[in-house]
């Protein structure tokens, strides 16, 4: 429900104040934005705070393995055409970070919230969302996340009977299985580049048939639903068959797919596709991703890739050989400590690029590149890699904490 009545009890107000104070201390100590510690403190004082903060907002949740942060940003920009928006724009996507974000949105009409896949069902239960966007599911953080089919089952159970409009990718069988328990689904043909997690049927375990862009299970009949929205080249097709041009400053087909899903979400709240897509053009970078920065008199483009599907998409948008490429991989808590996923990435796509390798797990990555018959140099740090790289813009691809390390080094 929307309105201006104050939903916060005195205890909740105290929790919000304490959380903001904790966040401020964290920022002053140089430990990041403070949103997570602030949210933890607030939830400790009032465990129901997230639900209380959401009561006056139209909540939109966005979850996926890849593209959550960017899509959240695109939806937020589109919905600003209809009213003030609060969002966890920096990607703190677990309950503590979400609570911190909502605590700062007392005047907002909409809350556009990125949610970690594991927490989607719980956050949906607390926030009573009007709309939930489900983009994709693929292998990621193998030491902490469930196997993808289990995650799809978790979503399916958690969203069963939800009153929300679920905007779901019709091209990802795992997403379709998860969304099918919801009574009100809007299907978007957003595509699926990475298919290696979707060859067995999530319904019965049978082998999936995948002729062209279609898919179906020959055993149980589970099949691709008919989409009402679709990405078609550089256009979004709406339910009336009208084609709306996509003009983004963000690169790659994956971001056009994110824009298509975002336009469908915006339409749920009465924002026309033309207006939504025009507003999305304002987004130049998302939490440092896609930024081109100057470092040591060189142009570096910063690209985030956290799992096999993400690396595949990223390889599709880098400049062609002989553009130099720096790869950096860590395996800290936020990345997942299991680096076996490196073996699922097709590094032969980098043939012809001069490659420079760094990060905590540079030797793991070096072994993988050696097996893929790539020529590369292992470097101690970014400075050395940039010094060794041949002329031209450098593409820098890193997983999560490695990306944050690089941003700090280049002052971004």
Image (spheres, rainbow, N blue to C red):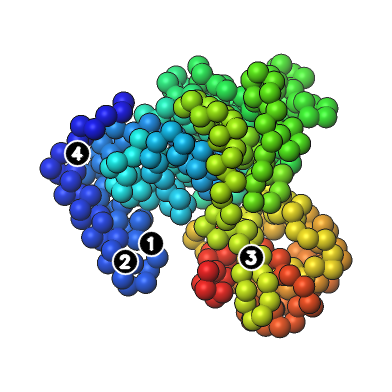
Cα gap from disc 3 to disc 4, whole angstroms = 42 Å
Cα gap from disc 3 to disc 1, whole angstroms = 22 Å
**Which dot marks residue 33?**
1
- Dot 2 or dot 1: first in sequence order is 2
- For disc 2, the neighbor class at 10 Å (few under 14, some 14 to 19, many from 20) is some
The residue that appears at 75% across and 26% down in the rendered structure is 215
Whole-percent x, y for residue 280 in the image: 57, 43
Asked if the residue under mark 1 is in contact with the one under mark 2, i.e. CB atoms within 8 Å, the reply is: yes
Location of mark 4 (residue): 8
The residue that appears at 14% across and 44% down in the rendered structure is 11
**Which dot marks residue 26?**
2
Cα gap from disc 4 to disc 2, whole angstroms = 25 Å
Q: In this view, does 163 lie to the left or right of 342?
A: left
Q: Can residue 239 be seen in this view?
A: yes
The residue that appears at 43% across and 52% down in the rendered structure is 92
SS at circle 3? strand
Whole-percent x, y for residue 232 in the image: 74, 32
The residue mark sitting in front, 3 or 4, is 3
The residue mark sitting in front, 3 or 2, is 3
């Amino acid at each position: 429900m929307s309105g201006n009545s104050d939903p916060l009890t005195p205890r909740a107000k105290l929790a919000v104040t304490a959380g903001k104070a904790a966040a401020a201390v964290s920022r002053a100590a140089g430990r990041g934005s403070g949103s997570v510690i602030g949210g933890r403190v607030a939830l400790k004082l009032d465990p129901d705070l997230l639900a209380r903060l959401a009561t006056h907002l139209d909540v939109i949740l966005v979850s996926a393995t890849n593209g959550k942060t960017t899509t959240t940003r695109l939806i937020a920009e589109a919905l600003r055409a209809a009213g003030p928006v609060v969002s966890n724009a920096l990607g703190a996507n677990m309950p503590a970070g979400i609570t911190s974000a909502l605590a700062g949105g007392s005047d907002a009409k909409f809350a556009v919230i990125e949610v970690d896949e594991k927490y989607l069902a719980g956050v949906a239960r607390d926030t009573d969302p009007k709309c939930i966007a489900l983009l994709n599911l693929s292998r990621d953080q193998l030491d902490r996340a469930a196997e993808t089919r289990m995650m799809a089952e978790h979503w399916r159970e958690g969203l069963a009977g939800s009153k929300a409009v679920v905007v779901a990718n019709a091209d990802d069988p795992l997403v379709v299985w998860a969304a099918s328990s919801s009574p009100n689904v809007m299907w978007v043909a957003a595509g699926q580049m990475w298919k290696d997690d979707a060859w067995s049927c999530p319904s019965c375990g049978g082998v999936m048939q995948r002729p062209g862009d279609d898919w179906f299970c020959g055993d149980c009949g589970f099949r691709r639903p008919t989409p009402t929205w679709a990405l078609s080249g550089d256009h979004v097709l709406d339910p009336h068959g009208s084609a709306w041009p996509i003009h983004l400053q963000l690169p790659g087909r994956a971001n056009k797919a994110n824009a298509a899903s975002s336009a469908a979400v915006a339409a749920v709240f009465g924002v026309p596709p033309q207006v939504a897509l025009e507003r999305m053009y304002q987004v130049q970078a998302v939490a440092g991703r896609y930024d081109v920065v100057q470092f040591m008199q060189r142009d570096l483009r910063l690209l985030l890739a956290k799992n096999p599907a993400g690396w595949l998409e990223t390889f599709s948008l880098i400049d062609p050989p002989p553009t130099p490429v720096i790869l950096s991989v860590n395996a800290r808590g936020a990345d997942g400590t299991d680096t076996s996923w490196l073996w699922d990435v097709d590094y032969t796509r980098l043939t012809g690029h001069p490659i420079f390798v760094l990060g905590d797990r540079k030797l793991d990555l070096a072994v993988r590149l050696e097996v893929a018959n790539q020529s590369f140099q292992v470097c101690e740090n970014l400075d050395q890699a940039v010094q060794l790289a041949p002329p031209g813009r450098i593409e820098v691809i890193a997983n999560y904490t490695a990306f944050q390390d690089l941003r700090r080094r280049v002052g971004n």
